Image (cartoon, rainbow, N blue to C red):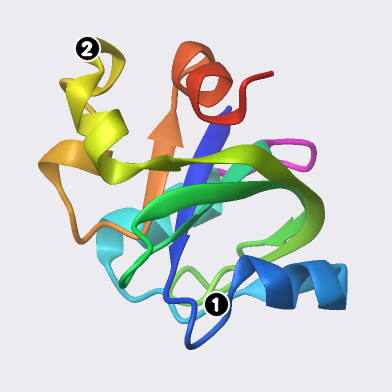
């Protein structure tokens, strides 16, 4: 399974992840987003999406480890992948039929969004 992780770049940007190489994804409080974090498995692909002024998918990462022993605060360790050759804007996502029923479009405040293989490929160009 693949996922999109939203982050506010003033709090933690993709550039921060590139510098750090890996991190524990935290600060999530929405019950649906927490459910998605608990469902993650090592090796799952991730798209990092920066909110705020940018509103774009900007890079990739992958899940290294998941500790869901505390369901209210799952610990998901991720490692950096690569920057996207061209960021994919929210406007581009909304305009594409692949995302018509996606929580990315329908639940704008959801910070962890599952992606189909086709959606992941569209966002990453892979």
In the picture as drawn, the residue positioned furthest to the left comes out as 106
- Front residue of 124 and 22: 124
Query: In the rendered structure, which segment of residues is drawn in magenta?
Result: 40-44
Query: Which secondary structure, mark 2?
Result: helix
Is residue 42 inside the magenta stretch?
Answer: yes
Mark seen at residue 16: none
Left/right placement of residue 48 relative to residue 79 reads: left
Instruction: Name the disc covering residue 97, or none.
Output: 2
Q: Quadrant of residue 98?
A: top left
Disc on res. 26: 1
Observer-nearest of 86 and 26 = 86
**Residue pushed farthest bottom?**
11
| Residue 89 percent coordinates (x, y) | 36, 43
List x then y, in percent, for residue 34.
40, 61
Q: Does 94 appear above or below 67?
A: above
Q: Position of residue 25 (x, y in %)?
A: 61, 70
Q: In percent of the image, x 56 and y 50: which residue is there?
A: 58
Most common SS among magenta residues: loop
In percent of the image, x 78 and y 43: which residue is there? 42
Q: Do the residues under discs 1 and 2 have CB atoms within 8 angstroms?
A: no
Q: Nearer the viewer, residue 120 or 87?
A: 87
Q: Is residue 69 visible?
A: no
């Amino acid at each position: 399974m693949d996922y999109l992780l939203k982050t506010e770049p003033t709090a933690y940007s993709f550039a921060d992840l590139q510098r750090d190489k890996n991190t524990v994804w935290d600060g999530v409080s929405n019950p649906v987003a927490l459910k998605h974090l608990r469902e993650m498995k090592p090796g799952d692909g991730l798209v990092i999406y920066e909110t705020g002024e940018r509103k774009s998918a900007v890079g990739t990462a992958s899940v290294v480890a998941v500790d869901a022993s505390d369901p209210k605060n799952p610990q998901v360790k991720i490692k950096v992948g690569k920057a996207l050759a061209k960021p994919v804007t929210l406007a581009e996502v909304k305009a594409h039929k692949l995302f018509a029923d996606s929580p990315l479009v329908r639940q704008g405040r959801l910070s962890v969004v599952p992606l189909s293989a086709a959606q992941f490929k569209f966002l990453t160009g892979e």
